[in-house]
Image: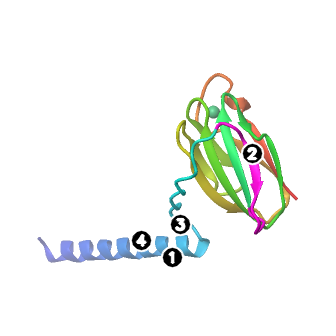
Amino acid sequence: MDRVEKIVLAFAAGLLGIFFLALLAAARLQGIDVPPCLPPEVRPFTEGRVDTLPNGTRQIFYVARMWRFEPEVVEVPAGQPLDIFLSAADVTHGFYLSWSNANLMAIPGAVNAYRVRLDKPGVYPIVCHEYCGTAHQNMVAYLVVK
Ligand SMILES: [Cu+2]
């Protein structure tokens, strides 16, 4: 291998290392992490509901089904942690909470979860981003942050 090729390869490998470290640092600074494992008592569910824990954390159990999310409208206070649990009652659906990082798949027989904190009051639409049938475009729910 030519000397210049070795230098270029070493430079490219160094750049890759720098980019990888920058990616890790950005994820750390933004609080982005791999989702934790769910406790074994969290089982797939078919009824949507909202629970409030003693520490103020809201737990929203969303069910996606053709072609709606349940519960359809949820009001939450701004600045409080929100635990979103998601399951599907029929086929695979998507779940995207607008203007946030909450982007999940709703899979029948499984539960996905994400913790989010919304500091800005407003109405956050939730849409399905996985084509799930003829009325897929009607799958909209709203999270109202007050
Ligand atoms: Cu859909």
The amino acid type found where label 3 is placed reads: Asp
Q: Which residue is mark 3?
A: 33
Question: Mark 1 to mark 4: distance in Å?
Answer: 9 Å
The answer to whether residue 104 is magenta is no
Q: Are marks 1 and 3 in contact (CB under 8 Å)?
A: no
Residue found farthest to the right: 146
**Nearest to viewer (mark 4 / mark 2):** 2
Mark carried by residue 49: 2
Mark 1: give few (<14), some (14-19) or many (20+) Cα within 10 Å.
few
Q: Which residue is mark 1?
A: 25
Residue 70: percent from left, percent from top: 74, 38
Q: Are marks 1 and 4 in contact (CB under 8 Å)?
A: no
Name which of mark 1 and mark 2 comes first in the sequence: 1
Name which of mark 4 and mark 3 comes first in the sequence: 4
Q: Are marks 1 and 2 in contact (CB under 8 Å)?
A: no
Residue found farthest to the top: 134
The amino acid type found where label 4 is placed reads: Phe
Name which of mark 2 and mark 3 comes first in the sequence: 3
Residue drawn at 76 percent across, 62 percent down? 118
**Nearest to viewer (mark 1 / mark 2):** 2
Q: Relative to residue 105, is residue 120 depicted above or below?
A: below
In terms of secondary structure, where does tag 2 sit?
strand
Q: Which residue is mark 4?
A: 20
Judge by depth and name the residue closer to the eye, 105 or 11.
105
